[in-house]
Image (tube, grey):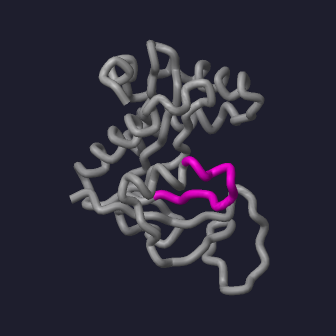
Amino acid sequence: MNNMQDDKITVDSMSFNDIEDILQKYSDQGWNKPRDIIEGYYEKQKNDDLYVFIAKYNDDLAGYTVLYKDTDVGPYANKRIPVINDLIVFEKFQRKGIGCHILDTAEQKASKFSNSVQLAVGLHSGYGAAQRIYVKRGYVPDGSGVWYKDSPLDPYDDCQNDDELVLYLIKNLS
């Protein structure tokens, strides 16, 4: 990515005005994101329970992610290892380095209170780009195996290759 492109990308904390923008971007793509989830992110951020990082490209909302200080699900539940969740770069903004800028910001924030950061990535082909970017950035499987609907999946168990079939990855930040 060249510097001109970098200058077009900004990442800041979510503001109240971003709520409508996010919902509109989802709608523009034919996706549905419940309003209460996005509003909940904003309210929890106001209460300092999590961080929401909004990326803009030429001042147009391009994507976001949520950084939780801790989680109560997955292999690192209640271990004070922050988790990156809901990393979204809207389709018309993909392949411009925006996801990397969002992750840089989230990882930098996470490093202020932990030596590592975790995330879960889906296993179907729709997550292919995310899988590749995470590996390139140093995320590695945590060794807990595949999880389905917030529980570890036993070998040879049945599951469905949907958004709830995930692999947990972790990155050392120190």
Position of residue 130 measured from the top left corner of the image (x, y, whole percent): 54, 49
Q: Is residue 79 magenta?
A: no
Above or below, 146 relative to 64: below
Q: Nearer the viewer, residue 95 or 134?
A: 95
Question: Picture quarter containing residue 101?
Answer: top left
Question: Picture quarter containing residue 94?
Answer: top right
Above or below, 156 relative to 22: below
Q: Nearer the viewer, residue 28 or 98?
A: 98
Position of residue 71 measured from the top left corner of the image (x, y, whole percent): 47, 60
Above or below, 119 relative to 97: below
Q: Is residue 127 magenta?
A: yes
Q: Residue at x 68, y 49 (%)?
A: 126
Q: Residue at x 59, y 33 (%)?
A: 38
| Left or right: 127 in relation to 55 | right
Q: Residue at x 50, y 34 (%)?
A: 64
Q: Residue at x 47, y 29 (%)?
A: 96
Residue range of the region highlighted in magenta in the rendering: 119-129
Q: Residue furthest bottom?
A: 155
Q: Quadrant of the N terminus?
A: top left
Q: Nearer the viewer, residue 42 or 102?
A: 102
Q: Residue furthest front?
A: 2
| Left or right: 76 in relation to 162 | left
Question: Picture quarter containing residue 34?
Answer: top right
Q: Residue furthest top?
A: 59
Q: Nearer the viewer, residue 163 or 47?
A: 163
Q: Quadrant of the C terminus?
A: bottom left
Position of residue 78 measured from the top left corner of the image (x, y, whole percent): 42, 67
Above or below, 164 relative to 142: above
Position of residue 82 measured from the top left corner of the image (x, y, whole percent): 38, 56
